[in-house]
Amino acid sequence: MRLIDSVAVAVQKYGDSIKIINGELVTLTRAFIEPLRYKNKIYIGGRKHTLGNYNNEKYLCIAKPSDKLVEDESVIECGDDKYIVKRCETYRVSDIPVYVWAILSRYNERMEDEYDAD
């Protein structure tokens, strides 16, 4: 087995069972989803409201390179939790995709951007 393939094998063997929803397309696969402890504002867009801090919990997802993730569109279900992809990229070595990483936010049926501004 090539070293590059070992990431996909580890994700398949040890990752959580997830469902990726891209519009009408639903994919059952496996991935690692963990709380993002280091909060870099470049990736997660932290912000502060006048009444206090906005809940900006973010999560890191590591998936197989064959899993299609689309920013602000893909919804990931893992157990009872539901997330939306905020940023994602494919990590490559010598033009060979090794894994996809994504920053996730909790998903609500009605997202904050849909509320009317006062």
Image (cartoon, grey):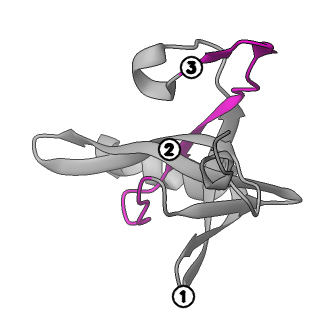
The relative height of residue 67 versus residue 58 in the rendered view (above or below) is below
Figure check: 58 above or below 22: above
Mark sitting earlier along the chain (1/2): 1
Residue extending farthest to the front is: 118
Q: Which residues are magenta?
A: 46-71
Q: Which residue is the site of mark 2?
A: 86
Q: State whether the magenta stretch is mostly helix, strand or loop.
A: loop
The answer to the question of whether label 3 and label 1 lie on touching residues, with beta carbons closer than 8 A, is no
Q: Nearer the viewer, mark 3 or mark 1?
A: 3
Q: Nearer the viewer, residue 46 or 21?
A: 46
Q: Quadrant of residue 27?
A: bottom right
Compare marks 3 and 1 and give the one earlier in the sequence. Answer: 1
Disc 3 secondary structure class: loop
Instruction: Report whether 115 appears left or right of 88.
Output: right
Badge 2 element: strand
Q: Secondary structure at mark 1?
A: loop
Q: Residue at position x 73%, y 60% from top?
A: 110
Q: Is residue 11 magenta?
A: no
Residue tagged by mark 1?
Answer: 24
What residue sits right under mark 3 in the picture?
46
In the rendered structure, which amino acid carries the disc numbered 1? Answer: Glu
The verdict on residue 51 being magenta is yes
Tell me where residue 3 appears, x and y as whole percent.
32, 41
Q: Is residue 80 left or right of residue 91?
A: right
